[in-house]
Amino acid sequence: MVQYMTSRLDGSFAALSDATRRGVLEQLGNGDASITELAGKFHMTLTGMKKHVGVLEQAGLVTTRKVGRVRTCALGLSRLADETAWIEDYRRLWASRFDALDKVVEELKRKEEVDE
Amino acid sequence: MVQYMTSRLDGSFAALSDATRRGVLEQLGNGDASITELAGKFHMTLTGMKKHVGVLEQAGLVTTRKVGRVRTCALGLSRLADETAWIEDYRRLWASRFDALDKVVEELKRKEEVDE
């Protein structure tokens, strides 16, 4: 399996492991939004939303810019390419593993038929 | 965006957010292994590895069976289909968002040229 940037994968999968954070990404896919708007949309305190945005920002999934007192959030540069690649590798591995098991089962069945 | 089983996505992305757990999945893709074997391979205590395997088991990514005193781990039934679907949706959203921004930038450039 290809070696990916371990710490980056850790951070982005952790960022995706929360429904609110995934919701924020979906929301920002429709347009930029301020922390206040996001907090309102997800029925959270400003402090709570700031934390979530911080996790997403760390993972490169969100960027923020502050104009006056308003911090606006936008989608970041990460398009989850490495994460997709890891999962695709895993799915290939998974499929070949289960194909191999299928073959073992079929082999056993055939043996059983011969024994009968 | 499609609504996925939120709690399941939470669990599986959290399970994938650790390099050792991703390593265990890759390892089990090559063949079943006991907790002891996995602990040895990843230079961990049995207790530490049991915890990781527990997280993977909860997420449906690993199954275990105990014969005598040995607990053997195998890949579970989850092939990360919903997780892949979520990420693919996100990537589509991301691309259309950045395409839209590209258009705005081009529009501004054109306007600038006309103004000059």
Image (cartoon, coloured by chain):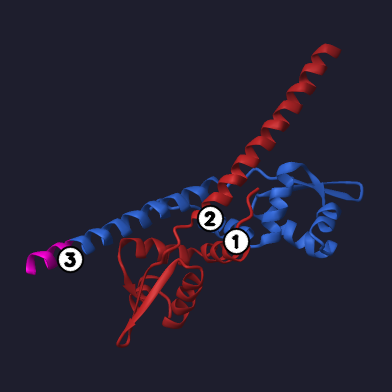
Chain colours: A red, B blue
Cα separation between marks 1 and 2: 8 Å
Specify the label residue B108 is tagged with: 3
Horizontal side of B91 relative to B35 (left or right) equals left
Q: Nearer the viewer, residue A81 or A99?
A: A81
Q: Circle 1 sits in a helix, a strand or a loop, which is it?
A: loop
Cα separation between marks 2 and 3: 33 Å
Q: Main secondary structure of the magenta part?
A: helix
Residue drawn 70% across the image and 43% down it: B29
Question: With respect to residue B5, does B30 lie above or below?
Answer: above
Name the residue type under label 3: Leu
Residue drawn 77% across the image and 20% down it: A109
Are the residues under marks 2 and 3 on the same chain? no
User: Which residue was labeled with disc 2?
Assistant: A82
* Closer to viewer: mark 2 or mark 3: 3
Residue B108's spot in the image, x, y percent?
17, 66
Cα separation between marks 1 and 3: 37 Å
Q: Tell whether label 2 touches label 1 (CB within 8 Å).
A: yes
Could you tell which of marks 1 and 2 lies nearer the N-terminus? 1
Specify the label residue B18 is tagged with: none
> Where is residue A95, by image quadrant?
top right
Residue B114's spot in the image, x, y percent?
8, 64
What is the span of residues highlighted in magenta in the rendered image?
B107-116
Residue B38's spot in the image, x, y percent?
81, 54
Q: Does A24 lie within the magenta span?
A: no
Q: Circle 3 sits in a helix, a strand or a loop, which is it?
A: helix
Give me the chain letter of mark 3.
B
Residue B11's spot in the image, x, y percent?
60, 59
User: Which residue was labeled with disc 1?
Assistant: A5
Name the residue type under label 2: Asp
